[in-house]
Amino acid sequence: MPTSAGWRTAFCFSGAGAVFADPFAYYPAGRGIAAGIARRIDAVTSGYGWPSVLTGPDLSSWSPLLELQTYHAQLACYQVLLDEFGVRPDALLGHSLGEITALVAANGFAVEDGAFLLCERAVALAAHADDDAATAAFMVSPQEGKAFAEQAEGVSVAAVNSPAQVVLSGPADQMMRLGDLAVARGVTVTPLRAGPYAQHHPALEPAFERYLQSVRGIRAAPLRTAVWSPVLARALEPEDDLVLLAALQMVRPLDFRGAVAGLRSAGVGEFVECGVKDTSTRLVTATLGDRARVSAPFRKRATEAEIRQITAHLTSHEEHAMTDSNDDMIGYLRENYAAALEIPEEMVTPDVDLEAEFGLDSLQHRLVLVKAAERWSVDLGRAESPATITVRSVAGMVRDAGAAGQA
């Protein structure tokens, strides 16, 4: 997995509920991408008897379908940013359910595996549902939030969202008492639609055990993009058990504020909402203020021109041109040639002859060059392809074009 050296941009995936109907209504290419991802998710969820994720969302209450619709919208936004606008993240950050989306976006899990994780999560939680549980956001500092939780039996800090917002969860009667106490002190309290259970709470240990048993057969792959975990409070390492991490969401609290601060310390200065609305990036702004820039390209139903305007600076020459290491560039080209040829990435070694060994044609080659030109803001229109097309020779061509553009 890439190290934090050179991190600039992080994509953020929010928790369940950040969704609205037909987010790509004014952008046909996005709608097509969303439909393709929906087919992959629906192939899994149909086995549970649930309707398509393209069904109009019901925002009046929590449901497993709402979680899957959030997951679907986030993956569609992610693919649109990569494929249509050439915006690539250096790191990924997910809040609660969004951490599963981040693992899928980083290629740790397939799209279908992510859907299966969410379906089995819903099944496990339903088996241990508790109508007497509640979750709410308190507009207080983390220290004040902890102090509130300590005044009630069975209440825990579920999430630290920002320096001024903490989520508490626990028995409904205890949460109601704390809510009344907080409101009396002038604190804003917002009940959350979180299902019939306490979010990120130790009481879910039985559901956690059942869930982990049901998903243990999933095979995770090495992450291709760095992922920062608010549950583990650090960037993920190659030896981390991703299936276990997905399950730990049930019983462990998360520190989104700490994750944002950690990414900023690692060099990230741009946080992009990868999903509809701007739920995550509002928390980023609450944490970092003007020390970072935020973008929410899909905060509303936007046209292609509007999305391009919002994301233009993310691929500008000043921000990204020729600043990646040679290893990063080779890794990027390997990934894209493998996708174009529809072969495993490990087969695309840096010096293999892509035409002779895999039958790379001119169209496949050109598609990769178009993406590379957008990624590094270089003009490859007049560049002459190497006599032998390898990942290493193409990387040299891209760097030469970048050097010529700066001359």
Image (tube, helix red, strand yellow):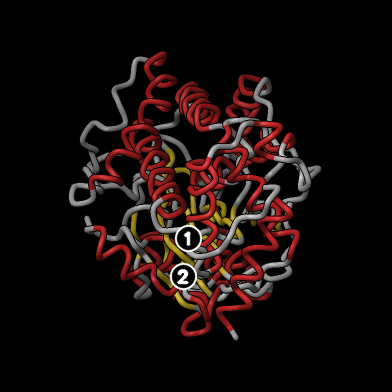
Where residue 401 appears, x then y in whole percent?
A: 59, 70
Where residue 67 appears, x then y in whole percent?
A: 39, 38
Q: Residue furthest left?
A: 26
In the depicted structure, whether residue 299 falls above or below residue 39: below
Amino acid on which disc 1 is placed: Val
Where residue 86 appears, x then y in whole percent?
A: 46, 58
- The residue drawn where x is 74% and y is 36% is 346
Closest to the observer, 101 or 37:
37
Residue indicated by mark 2 = 314
Q: Are marks 2 and 1 in contact (CB under 8 Å)?
A: yes
Q: Is residue 173 visible?
A: no
Closest to the observer, 163 or 323:
323
- The residue drawn where x is 45% and y is 68% is 283
| CA distance separating discs 2 and 1 | 6 Å
Question: Image quadrant of residue 209?
Answer: top right
Query: Is 405 situated left or right of 180 in this image?
Result: right
Question: Image quadrant of residue 263?
Answer: bottom right
- The residue drawn where x is 65% and y is 73% is 323
Sooner in the amino-acid sequence: mark 2 or mark 1: 1
Where residue 87 is drawn, which disc sits there? 1
Q: Residue furthest right?
A: 239
Query: Is 132 situated left or right of 226 in this image?
Result: left
Amino acid on which disc 2 is placed: Leu
